[in-house]
Amino acid sequence: MLRFLPLIIANLRRRKLRTLFTLLSVAVAFLLYGLLAAVRNGFEANVQVAGIDRLITMHKVSIVQPLPLSYQAQIAAVPGVRLVTHATWFGARYQNERNELTVYPVPAESYLQMYPEYRLAPADKARWLRDRGGAIVGRSLARAYGWKTGDRIPLRSDIFAGKNGYVWDFLIDAIYDNKDPSGDTSSIFFHYDYFDESRTSQKGIVGWYIVQVADPGRAAEIGRAIDARFANSSAETKTGTEQAFLQSFADQTGDIGAIVVSIGIAVFFTMLLVTANTMAQSVRERTNELAVLKTLGYGDGQVLALVVGEALVLTGLGGLLGTCAAELAIRRLGVSLGQYMSGFLLTQKALALAALLVLALGLVAGALPALRASRLRIVDALARR
């Protein structure tokens, strides 16, 4: 194939404008693919890294219904439960209505123990544990707003009033990272004790419990045992896996996977038609030249490889340009989108799929023109002069 490369490049340069437009069309298709793949990963990243040994216990009616703080000790007493912590939706905004943030009051020590993937330097962790009114902020969120350790940020809660009304003031004690690059770093955590002491109503309640089980194989059994403890109470519970819990949040925006696949199929089908048309025109224009090549001893297989190689070079260059453009765009957009999705990036799996798509697009687009060229009869081709 490499020995055909100079001839392939010469053929592509024959109609520079047509080649350029086809190349740009393929590049745009892969740009869209990269952006859609990053969006999909951003919505699904937390679901994919959910702990297999973690359960979520929430109110049986809805997650917006709170649970009593007293449930924690009862859940911890269920056989097979290793650790229990909790979180509550705070409903915060920063500066204006558009900047809605993900903020949770949590019991700091047990929460960090439950989520070891959240990385804090020992000194930062100790500082946060000492500071009852402090908070830790995810790396992507801090990058989006330009925050750093030591900054003081005012957040307005849509739900809870404190000592200063609905505006709560927090000192950033640390910025946390995640051991998984696509894991969550877009949240803010502060101390539940400070929150419960400062709020003016709904004291002694939490949003949901996170339960770590000793044996993931018994997760369903332990979940049923937890729910049985609160059956027929004023706040019955529903316990499920953390993955199912996070998936329910992702599903609120629709089936992102199906949307991405549908758009991708439409875009690549269009690109297939465009590229196949370009190759067909190129072969028709070079009928006499292909006949000369066969006269010089080139076999049907070599002519077929030449045309398919031309299609692969065209889609390969377009795919490379589009993927590089997508990576640059994702890095730029990731700064502003970090407050909403920390997994907004191109994964190795997405890049591998892009390479397969380049190969498939080139082979399919060049298959029919290449087959016609390989079956070309020298006498018939030369007679068309």
Image (tube, rainbow, N blue to C red):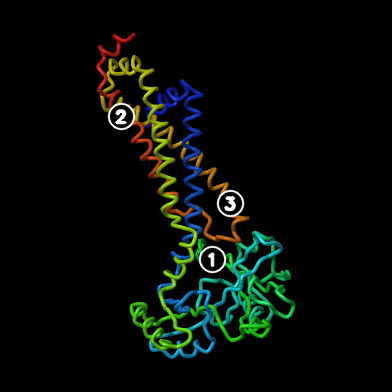
* Residue 304 in sight in this render: yes
Q: Which mark is residue 368?
A: 2
From the viewer's side, name the closer residue of 375 and 65.
65
* Residue 170 in sight in this render: no
Location of the C terminus by quadrant is top left
Location of the N terminus by quadrant is top left
Give the residue number, with chain letter if any, for mark 3: 331
Is 174 situated left or right of 181 in this image?
Answer: right
Give the residue number, with chain letter if any, for mark 1: 184
The three-letter amino acid code for the residue at tag 2 is Leu
The first of marks 3 and 1 along the sequence is 1
In x, y percent, where is residue 80?
Answer: 38, 86
The three-letter amino acid code for the residue at tag 1 is Asp
Q: Quadrant of residue 282?
A: top left
SS at mark 1? Answer: loop
In x, y percent, where is residue 168?
Answer: 70, 74
The three-letter amino acid code for the residue at tag 3 is Arg
The first of marks 3 and 2 along the sequence is 3
